[in-house]
Amino acid sequence: MQKKIVKGFTLIELLVVMAIISILSGAGVVAYNSYTSSAKETATKANHTKIVNNMESEFAKCKLDKSSKIFNSHKCDSSNRPSTGTINNYVNSLGLKNPYDKSQPVAQSNVCTSGSIAISEKETGSYNVAYASVKKKKKHTSLVSSGWSENYSKTKTTSVAFTCASTASASSGPKQTIYTYKPPHSGPGAGIIVDENGNMLAGQGAHACGPDCFNGKMPNWYTTDSNGNRIYPGRAGSKWRWVMTEGASASGNIASSCNGGNCKYNFSNGTYKVLNSGVTYKAGESIANRKAVP
């Protein structure tokens, strides 16, 4: 009887097959990453559209009824327009999700934070609502006007070429919150008291402060809010926190731009925004040496 010979694969044939599989797998990973990146940018664009539509709807309420409240708390018959802080708090209560990191709020001050929508006041009563497309290297901004606007106009959206110098991704590096805050350095420096969204305590300005303020070593120090309630910014678990904005200069001088509630702190990337100028700075740098960040 003749034996039936079964031929196997040679080593070269096996290596060729493995190389083909590796190439196909790599292509699949690239395609998947491209798909997820596009999906996240699409979700960010959808959030931007929803926020613009909601702002328009809120402002429209005031046209129908001057006794109404918009953005949860602002009175339509007020002589003052809604602050960006009030609008940000309202936006972050809508249940929108940051597609890059669901633990991070959608409304943030830095347009270069992945998935964020930055709301700023262009002029009295008119607001820029912007987001950055890292993939397309563009910034898309919608100008939304209100009844408080000096130059009222219908909402219009513009797109300009834009590149974030270093994208502050919500998913990169250790994330900080009001409960895990660590100062940029040991101090001394200027500090402000903020809530979990980075909004300053009403009626409070910046204070010159040593390391003990920022490191939680003053648990019994307190101030009061507008209703006379005690606020303990140095206590663990408090809903208010001392955060450093500016550091001391080389000569030891401490100065700050944060007065009368005009600053907002961003826990996710360690920056603060001076609201009346719209400029964002990295926390911990002195006024003389600080530089604006995108």
Image: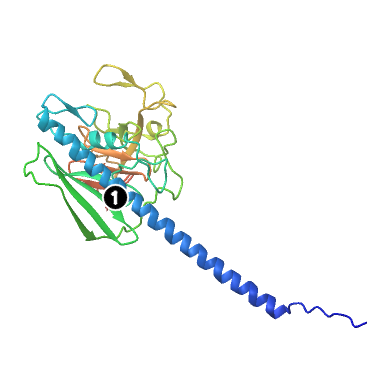
In the figure, is residue 62 to the left or right of 6? left
Relative to 84, is 19 above or below?
below
Residue at 48% x, 64% y is 30
Task: Give the image location of residue 102, x and y in percent.
Answer: 42, 42
Q: Residue furthest right?
A: 1
Residue at 45% x, 49% y is 173
Relative to 132, is 28 above or below?
below
Q: How many marks?
A: 1
Task: Give the image location of residue 77, x and y in percent.
Answer: 10, 26
- Label 1 Cα neighbours within 10 Å, binned few <14 / some 14-19 / many ≥20: many
Q: Quadrant of residue 106?
A: top left
Residue closest to the eye, 181 or 66: 66
Task: Give the image location of residue 200, x and y in percent.
Answer: 27, 32
- Viewer can see residue 205: yes
> Element type at marker 1?
loop
Q: Residue furthest top?
A: 228
Q: Residue furthest bottom?
A: 2
Relative to 134, is 290 above or below?
above
- Viewer can see residue 250: no
How did the renderer colour the structure? rainbow
Q: Residue furthest left?
A: 151
Quadrant into which the N terminus falls: bottom right
Q: Quadrant of residue 124?
A: top left
In the figure, is residue 59 to the left or right of 182? left
Amino acid bearing label 1: Val
Task: Give the image location of residue 98, x and y in percent.
Answer: 37, 45
The residue tagged 1 is 111
Residue closest to the eye, 9 or 164: 9
